[in-house]
Amino acid sequence: MTKLVELDLEFDFSDAIEAIQFDDTATHGSSGMKRVDFIAEYESFYRLIEVKDPDDPVASNPNAFVQKLRSDELIRSLAGKYRDSLLFRILSNKCNKDMHYVVLISMASLEPALLLSKQDALNREMPINHENWAMSAAKSSIILNLEQYKRHFGENSVRRISDGNI
């Protein structure tokens, strides 16, 4: 059973062939490339996952996150993390399956309508397709809150560590 932790969230990737913490210096060395938090491999695709957790009980400045969310800064950062991670995987010859990008924003006060508009902005910023490309940069891209993530990937796919539920 593969479990990985990002901030106050623990992810269960027991349904994956392999799951790795991608945002680490052991993998990237001193590279300045941006990177997603996790990559999980499944039979026919990879899932690249970026986690933002302003609801973490020890988050240093949740208001700064809200400012980034409401501006274009967060979307530019999320798109850059995906693009750099995708490039790293291509150059590592680990891009032989469809790529799905999932962004989890664990913020209870976040309105679903804002999530949808940010998802559209992310798809434009990445971009997913281009008329000159032979293939898509991603099969899908989605931004979810914590409850949506659990509905989409299973109730036990993620848990808040500080809640103490095992």
Image (cartoon, rainbow, N blue to C red):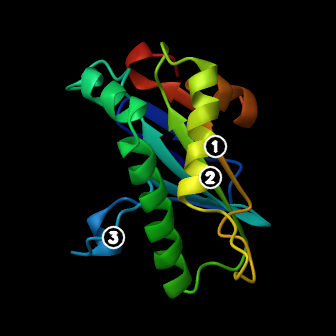
Q: Position of residue 149 (x, y in %)?
A: 64, 31
Q: Amino acid at mark 2?
A: Asn
Q: Secondary structure at mark 3?
A: loop
Q: Earlier in the sequence, mark 3 or mark 2?
A: 3
Q: Residue 1 or 139: which is nearer the viewer?
A: 139
Image mark for residue 120: 1
The span from disc 1 to disc 2 (Cα, nearest Å) is 5 Å
Q: Can you identify the residue that label 3 sits on?
A: 33
Q: Can you identify the residue that label 2 sits on?
A: 123
Q: Residues within 10 Å of mark 2 (few under 14, many from 20)?
A: some
Q: Residue 166 or 56: which is nearer the viewer?
A: 56
In the image, is residue 107 above or below residue 47?
A: above
Residue drawn at the location 35% of the way across and 25% of the way down? 66
Residue 1 appearing in the image: no
Q: Position of residue 5 (x, y in %)?
A: 42, 41
Q: Amino acid at mark 1?
A: Asp
Residue drawn at the location 73% of the way across and 76% of the way down? 131
Q: Residues within 10 Å of mark 3 (few under 14, many from 20)?
A: some
